[in-house]
Image (cartoon, rainbow, N blue to C red):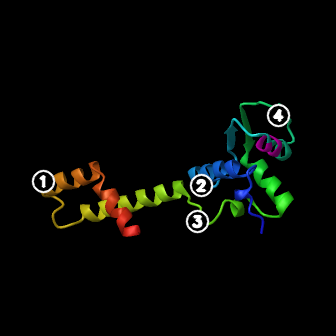
Amino acid sequence: MTDLAHDSAWSRLLASARRSWERTGGRLDTTISLSEPTEEERYLIIGITGVHRVPGVRRVAVRLIELDGYLRQAYGRDLASFLGPSLRDRPAERGAAASAREALLVQASQGRYREEEWFQRWLTEIRRDGTLTRLIRAERD
């Protein structure tokens, strides 16, 4: 099994790809870039994209779809397999938290004290100060 994450030419590129993957939920239609690339990184990007970058270039960029295609062709594995275990899907996590928050609020709106003024103030306060979100996260963990 090839461990590119420990290869100096690959480490920053794969770290950037992982951040993008987690931020977008695994979308491959995004572009990542490296600022102040080393010569090894510059040559790697040239190899992946087929586009020459001059020495001393300040930033190099590659589309994740190109990186994925290169890894499949060169190593027979997709990008996700190189990004390591426990990849997070942050958009899905946010969606699940929002759904859980909404379900909890629906449940609260049907409770015994739903029409009491103090209950409405309390519910508004725990929504505003983040307590509701923390409770949902604690339940999930």
Amino acid type indicated by mark 4: Arg
The residue positioned 81% from the left and 54% from the top of the image is 69
- Mark 4, residues whose alpha carbon is within 10 Å: few (<14), some, or many (≥20)? some
Mark 2 vs mark 1: which is more N-terminal?
2
The Cα–Cα distance between marks 3 and 2, rounded to whole angstroms, is 13 Å
Mark 4 vs mark 3: which is more N-terminal?
4
- Mark 3, residues whose alpha carbon is within 10 Å: few (<14), some, or many (≥20)? few
User: Is 91 a magenta residue?
Assistant: no
Q: Which mark is residue 25?
A: 2
Dot 3 corresponds to which residue?
86
Dot 4 corresponds to which residue?
53
**Residue 92 horizontal/vertical position (percent):** 52, 58
Mark 4 vs mark 2: which is more N-terminal?
2
Mark 1 vs mark 3: which is more N-terminal?
3
Quarter-of-image position of residue 71: bottom right
- Mark 1, residues whose alpha carbon is within 10 Å: few (<14), some, or many (≥20)? few
Quarter-of-image position of residue 116: bottom left
Q: Is residue 17 above or below residue 99?
A: above
**Predominant secondary structure in magenta?**
helix
Nearer to us of marks 1 and 3 is 3
**Residue 106 horizontal/vertical position (percent):** 31, 61
Q: Is residue 48 above or below residue 133?
A: above
